[in-house]
Image (cartoon, helix red, strand yellow):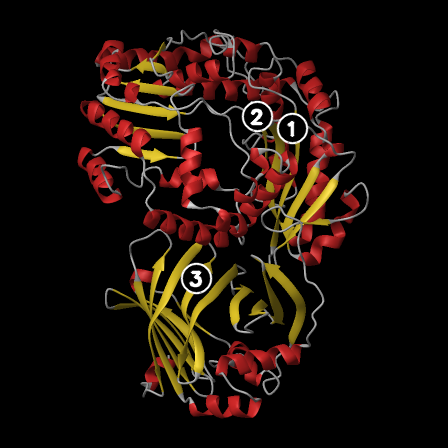
Amino acid sequence: MKKIITLILTGFLFAPAFGQLDRSVQPKAGPAPVFNIPESVIFTLNNGITVILSENHKTPRFSFNLVMGSDPMLEKEKAGLSEVAGQLILSGTETMDKDQLDKAIDMLGVHFSADGNSIYASGLSKHKEKMLEILQNVVSSANFPEKEFDRIVKQNESALTMASSDADQIAQNVLSTVDFGRNHPYGEVMTKETLANITRDDVVSYFKKEFTPNGAYLVVVGDVTKAEITALLQGSIEKWTGGEKFTASYTVENKNQGRRLIFVKKPGAVQSVIKVTFPFNMKPGDPNQIRLNLMNQILGGGTFEAKLMQNLREDKAYTYGCYSSVNVNRYGSYFTTSGSFRNAVTDSAIVQILKEIESMKVDTSVSQAQLDLAKASSIGSFSRSLESPQTIARFALSIIQNNLDKDYYKNYLKKIDEVTLTDIQNMAKEYLAVDRSYIIVVGNEDIAEKLVQFDTDGKIEYLDAFGNEEAGFTKSDLTLDQILEKNILATTQSATIKEATKKIAKIKSVQQEIKASPAGSPVSFDMISYFQAPNKEAIVINFNGSMMQRQYSNGVTGGSEASPMAGGKSEELTPEEVAEKNQTAGILPELFYKANKVEANLLGIKEEMGKKYYVVEIKSKDGVSQSYYDATSFLKTKTYSSSKSKDGEVNEVTIEYSDFKDASGILMPYKMSQQFGQMALSSEVQSIEINKSIDGKVFEK
């Protein structure tokens, strides 16, 4: 140890004799490192499965990924079928129901997952035989129970409600539909309408067509030899039989003659999600792919030094992040930039994004230092990936699937090193079709007209959250007063407003006990809702018998409180907020809109899922709310609200009401599907008590 210390000190003491390091000059990049990438073992089973084995005996781990060789299918009016099928694959077999299958997997301590095109598992290598037995059981006899099908459909309904309020997901939905179109599998987006068209029989049929050993790949990684895995497969997956793999070809091309501005309305949004995107022709392994990746790395590929980030974040402070990506796939490729921006700078942000993309075509736009940095980043990322044996197997699969040269990945670093500044400029000129791009904006409608300037034809295309042409509102055949009156009569089951008023006047208090469960979670909690005429309201949320949160208002003061477990935060409502809350308090606020001077506005008729609704909007100081009245029953079946909190955060809540039952002459919903931002809840009323004595403390601080 003493000798090592001496040597280190000597290095410091005599360093000046060799001159000082000039840190103002960037060191020249050395040659790209050379890696000897081990080859995977590849062989074919008698039933048509190509096995790709990457041995790794350093740790006692084992994994496999069964990937189908079938091409993606067009699902049309059943868009989302592959997603539903993938979620159901591990829901049981002919010999094991879901609970038994889950228990068998848990007992081994292994992980299984599936999607519409593959099944993956990983665990300790000592369990590999059992893991392959489970795989054989699933692919040979998955039975898709009706009960599980219904559960997955409901789970997707909640997810779609969530997606319809998630600006990033909305923008991605729209990107898929405009870049690929409805005649391409990547351009299909699941909606509630297409989900409703999917049956269990459709799932069974899809599985039989898509999941077949012919043309499939089994990627095996871990502590196993070829001899061992061959013997194991002969006793399991090689017994699987099936039909021919599904084949189809798809084309993607940029048909734009100019820029198109596409807008999705998100009421109350305080920022906009922007994507500039377009498809382009390129297959994996194209000679230009590596050059294009480096060009994108410089433009906006994820580092702070990238041009988009330097301009829009560091210089202009428009956003926390703005990125670009090139997505190359054998079924269709596309380019996109994305970021979230304040409403006030949405138009300015688009100007700068377009400017940075166009600047890549200019001779002096990219420096050698920028290119060297991009190369170093790409080489480092590639080199680190080689530490994983999964990478080696993935390379082998990519070579087979994409018909790449056998030495494609062995020469990868050399090809990166050979890229020049001229190559970068040529890639920008050839592929960055910004003048024929789609500019997608998801945001508050108030900013839409400012964006017309970016559309070549000077118009805005409005789409909905799933990339369909926005239906918008058609003119109502009824006035606002008529709609509210019909709702009051339907809810109170009355013949006249006078009769309805008497019924409501008799109701002095309402107490509801509700059981609520987050989507996809076995956990549930209790909510108790209180109302006392004329305007006292409270909601108490309990978990395991303990109060987690409470909201309250006595008509004069109000607020909320949370237990330490739920954050311990307390807030008080301002007098203005209480007054605003009083306007729509009660079990039937529509009856008192006029008396409370509620500023309601009839938007018109909107059609959703084949049903028509009258939509009424109420604007407040901090947000907006919309009520959907069924055009047939005139019951209020959905509400949407968007409001801004004191810290500027936008809170969005969507509630769907169903299963209306009589409670002292009033039709009240016994089931609610609620969406709070990214959280979905399914709620069911356990009991409703009318005119029960309520402890007034629940409405007080």
**Label 1: element kind:** loop
User: Where is residue 387, by image quadrant?
Assistant: top left
Disc sitting over residue 331 in the figure? 2
Count the labels in the image.
3
- Name the spot of residue 89 as percent of width and height, x first: 35, 37
For residue 673, the mark is: 3
587 relative to 355 in the view: left or right: left
Type of the residue with mark 1:
Val
Among all residues in the image, which is located at the extreme right? 457
Q: In the picture shown, does residue 223 fall above or below 566? A: above
Q: Would you call the spot at circle 3 few (<14 residues within 10 Å), some (14-19), or many (20 or more)?
A: many
Q: Quadrant of residue 250?
A: top right
Q: Label 1 belongs to which residue? A: 252
Q: For the residue marked with disc 2, what is the amino acid? A: Tyr
Residue plotted at (75% across, 49% down): 460
15 lies left or right of 316: left
Determine whether label 1 and label 3 are within 8 Å by CB: no
Q: Is residue 41 left or right of residue 452?
A: left
Q: Is residue 525 above or below residue 396?
A: below
